[in-house]
Amino acid sequence: MVPTADGPMPGHLWRPPAGGGSGILLLQEIFGVSGYIQRRAAALAAEGYVVLAPELYWRLDRQRVDEGADDAVDQAMALAGQLDPDVAVDDAVAAFGTLGELTADAGPPAVLGFCLGGGLAFSVAARTEPAALVAYYGSALPQLLDLAPHVTCPSLHHFGTADDYLPMDVVRSVTEAVTADGRPARVELYEGANHAFDNDDFFLHHPDASRRAWSTTLGFLREHLPG
């Protein structure tokens, strides 16, 4: 559980085989802490990280949407629309603090988010001092660029070139903002990949982009997280 101003927020914790290590705060897509998100967390734990995925929909009547449903996007957009963005950032920052206490011996955690979680991860990085930030197609990033000067940690951003929600002119604006003034940001593009290309339970999954982005993510985390 993660202490918040409104009570304890549920979260899922994965530990590596060694029991401890550097921390990664994993922030969900609009579908919730789905089976896909849990598999990604387990894969990171297998790489040696302590992973915390908070239930950011915990105040709502529902916490999950089945990505395989015909109207999955409509359901998930409606659910995400009930989320107070400022409260969600506060919750994510609280989770970052909780994880930091659990992994204090390994230094500050990194933060990694997908879609909805990508924007939240960016906001967390602006308010805290993570070891690194990874954002997959952060859907709210275009509205958060005023925070870019406050995101000073190394960051990695993944975008598909065929994203229906983040067209390339928007991606270029994001790239200019996050890399301005020599900030240590890296942007990777995946030809022909749409939004949510990493989610293998969703119809927009792009296997090649997913594989390459995950390999890049692991390399980036190894570079910037100790141990």
Image: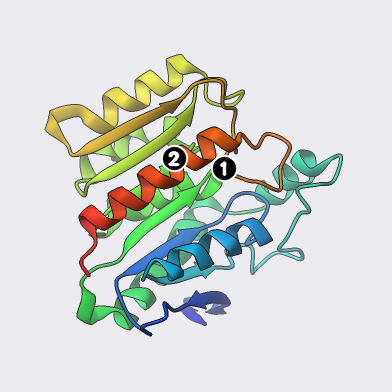
Q: Where is residue 205 in the image (x, y as percent from the top left)?
A: 65, 37
* Above or below: residue 135 compared with residue 206: below
In the rendered view, does 217 fall on the left or right side of 159?
Answer: left
The image quadrant of residue 224 is bottom left
User: Do residues under tags 2 and 1 come within 8 Å of each other at their CB atoms?
Assistant: yes
The secondary element bearing badge 1 is classed as: loop
Residue 58 or 86: which is nearer the viewer? 58
* Above or below: residue 19 compared with residue 127: below
Figure colour scheme: rainbow
The image quadrant of residue 146 is top left
Residue 224 or 7: which is nearer the viewer? 224
Q: How many marks?
A: 2
Q: For mark 1, what is the residue?
A: 198
Q: What residue type is labelled 1?
A: Asp
Residue at 45%, 38% in the rendered image: 212
Q: For mark 2, what is the residue?
A: 213
Q: Position of residue 61 (x, y in %)?
A: 76, 66
Judge whether residue 122 can be spotted in this image.
no
In the rendered view, does 60 fall on the left or right side of 212?
Answer: right
- The crowd level at tag 2 (other Cα within 10 Å; few <14, some 14-19, many 20+) is many
In the rendered view, does 105 fall on the left or right side of 110?
Answer: left
Q: Distance between the residues labelled 2 and 1?
A: 8 Å
* Above or below: residue 65 compared with residue 12: above
Q: Position of residue 125 (x, y in %)?
A: 31, 53
Looking at this view, name the residue that lies furthest to the right.
Answer: 70
The secondary element bearing badge 2 is classed as: helix
In the rendered view, does 65 fall on the left or right side of 23?
Answer: right
Residue at 59%, 37% in the rendered image: 207
Looking at this view, name the residue that lies furthest to the top.
Answer: 169
Residue at 65%, 68% in the rendered image: 59
